[in-house]
Amino acid sequence: MKFESQLLKGVAPVVVLEILSGGEMYGYELSQAIEQRSGEILTLGKGTLYPLLYNLEAKKLVQGKWETAETGRKRRYYSITSKGKDELAKQKAQLKELTACLNLVFGGTIALA
Amino acid sequence: MSDKKSDSKGLPECVGQYVRQLLKKMRYRRKARNEVEAELTAHFEDELKDCKSSEEKEQKARQLVTEFGDFKLLGILLRRAKKRCRPLWRTVAARTFQTIGVLIVCLIIYTVWFSFGKPTIRVDYIRLLNQINQPQIRDQDNAWPHYEKAIKLYVPQSALVKQFISYRRNGREREDAIRLKYLLRDNAGQIQSWLEQNQKYWDNLTSDQKAVLLKCLEYDWVPFPQTAYQSYNDWRTTTFVLMVEHILRCIKEDAKLTTPRPFGVLSSSMNPGYPCDELKRWLENNMIPPNHLEAVSVAVLREAIKRFKDLPEDITAPLMDVECEYIGRWIAQNEAAWLQFDASSTKSYCYRPYAHDPNDRDKSLWSIPLPPLSSLRDLARLGIWRSRINRDKGHLQQSVVDCLAVARSASHWQGKGTLVEQLVGSALSNLAHEEILNILADRKLSADEVRQLYEQLSEIYPGGYPSINTEGERLAFMDVVQCSFTDGGPGGGHLIPGIWDKYIDLGSPAPYVNETEERLFMPFYTALSMAHARRDATVMKANEIYGLQSRIARMTPYQRHVSDLKTLDEIMQEPWFNYRFFLIGIFMPATERASEIAYRGKMIHDSTLTITAILRWRQEKDQYPAALDNLVSAGFLGELPMDPYSDKSLVYKKTENDFTLYSVGPNFADDDGQVAIKHGNPVRWGTDEDGDIVFWPVTRNDY
């Protein structure tokens, strides 16, 4: 199932922050994680990921650093900042509220972990 | 961050091309682009690492490129995102530089527009000035046609006449002449003996050779050949005075006559009339006479004796025969010119319309050709010398007539027109009055002649002695403004940068900078123009200053002395005046000084009238009047002569057998009729420190 891009646009930063809250990741790894964690339902466009990461970095919600992997390849690892964690908590709370509202509308079929 | 730049080897060509296009479209800092390139390359490598074959790799790569989307859009998104990542100081710096850049571009556009500003000529100020000066008189009452003829007929002084005249004028030439007079007198015996011994060399010359050498002496340049390798190769020259001194030194030391130290070379640029060509011909044809040096020295010494031996120490003493001969010849040559000048002086008015020189690109009032004032001055001097010679010959009536002609002519140039014309008029008036005072000092005029002189002098200025008129100068400045500023209105009314070059070089005989240099200076001139006050402000300031100057011109020096009016110098010392009002600074005339000169002219005119009245009183009543009031009440004098340096009457004092009449002078203090002395010489017009201006007894003046 694919979501409308406008719908996805609102939740994409929360999804990225949520995944990065589990540990630092580089771009490719992050795109893979999003797909896996969403059961391949959420597929963030490749062209959307990097601008999104840079925007989150500009807002100081994530921070990137260059590291050399065991294979010798240089990668940019992104990790969530404390500000990012606060923002994530805030966004999640808002989504919960939204879900609750939507449950009321749709008869309790939507749940957020 | 070149270390983070990834190596995209091993990736399909479509990926490399995609990344390159994307980075190109990103158009951002190299460091950020390198980071993005490294990150994307790593991403592609990770995506393709599991591909088994190159075909599969190629296929998947194409799919990935499609998933990444349009490289243009992605490039823009990445640029925006990266821009948001930069630190605040970078953003501030970038915005600052951008703002500066925009301002510079605006400034350049404004400067270009500013530089190409053109003036709009709306008012014909020349016509306005002509309207002001044009009198309501018949053409036959206009003096100008006679002046024009006189100027055309005038024969200038020859070099020798100029020399003789210079011996009767305080200055270096006269000092040299007096020194040589004593040298000639003190060594008369030796000189006579030397001349007798060497006369033969002069006598051996042909008449043509003598004529050429005498011609050289007329121009005060003595030629002598330069010797090299036992032959003559060029001419050298020295001045007449230096040559006389050199010969006298040799005679005194009883030494052999040697070649003097050259002062210059023979050049065709010498005064017109100097026989350069003949001398060169002598050299080319080996025609230089033997003992040239002795021969020319004989001529020089004889000429020196002729000129200096009897030169009187009193500068106003009767003229020597030789002076009468040469100056009289010049006067005779100018009889026709003088008749025209004399005729012009009898006219009531002189009107000469101002007009552009058709060959002059500058059409402003400032650049109009003035009347040939130097020729007028020469004609006036001719009149004074006529008077002087007539006086020496005892023809006093004719002497007075000549002076009156000059005085009447002077009045034509006063009180109107340009400041320069008015100043020349004032100077001519002073010249005539000074000579009249010299005639009066001889006390040879009868009571009736003195009365006539008084009446004729009184008639010269029926409306009173004119003060300085600054209207012509104001119109000229307004024309300068019209030609130098763009029109007013939004963004307009600025000083045109191109005019700076013209005005900075004002007064130089030729343009100081050429066109290339002018272009180089243009940015500087543009900056100066931007700093200069705009048209409206300049006109307002100029009107303020001209108004002040007009008031000043009507104030006597004493009134200015006691008033607290700002002088032009004080106004111009205000901060930034010379930058904000540069044009006013260079064009504003020194009206205060000109006004003072006019008041002095009035004073000398009034004092001359007063002296004629006193002398008439003396001749009729056999005594001097007790006070000047007596002259007025008895009808000998129209009004008391005012002293502009005290705002009271001129000081009159009876002495034992004479009287004194003086002004307290520019120090505004009565020094009891004593003239200031500076460097041993009397200062006619006093100084700011001391000295009075004494009209009687007459201080002998030069010519």
Image: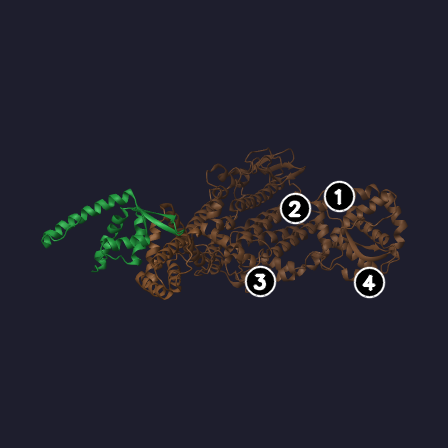
Q: Are marks 3 and 2 on the same chain?
A: yes
Look at the image and name its color scheme.
Answer: by chain
Q: Which mark is residue B439?
A: 2
**For the residue marked with disc 3, what is the amino acid?**
Pro
Residue B358 on image: x %, y %? 54, 65
Q: Tag 3, which secondary structure? A: helix
In this structure image, what is the colour of chain A?
Answer: green
The N terminus of chain A appears in which quarter of the rendering?
bottom left
Image quarter of residue B437? top right
Residue where numbered disc 3 is placed: B145
Distance from disc 1 to disc 3, alpha carbons, whole Å, reads 43 Å
Mark toward the viewer: 3 or 2? 3
Q: Are marks 4 and 1 in contact (CB under 8 Å)?
A: no
Q: Earlier in the sequence, mark 3 or mark 4?
A: 3
Distance from disc 4 to disc 2, alpha carbons, whole Å, reads 55 Å
Front one among B546 and B328 = B546
Distance from disc 2 to disc 1, alpha carbons, whole Å, reads 25 Å
* Mark 4 belongs to chain: B
Residue where numbered disc 4 is placed: B284
Q: Tag 2, which secondary structure? A: helix
* Mark 2 belongs to chain: B
Q: Earlier in the sequence, mark 4 or mark 2?
A: 4
Q: Earlier in the sequence, mark 1 or mark 3?
A: 3
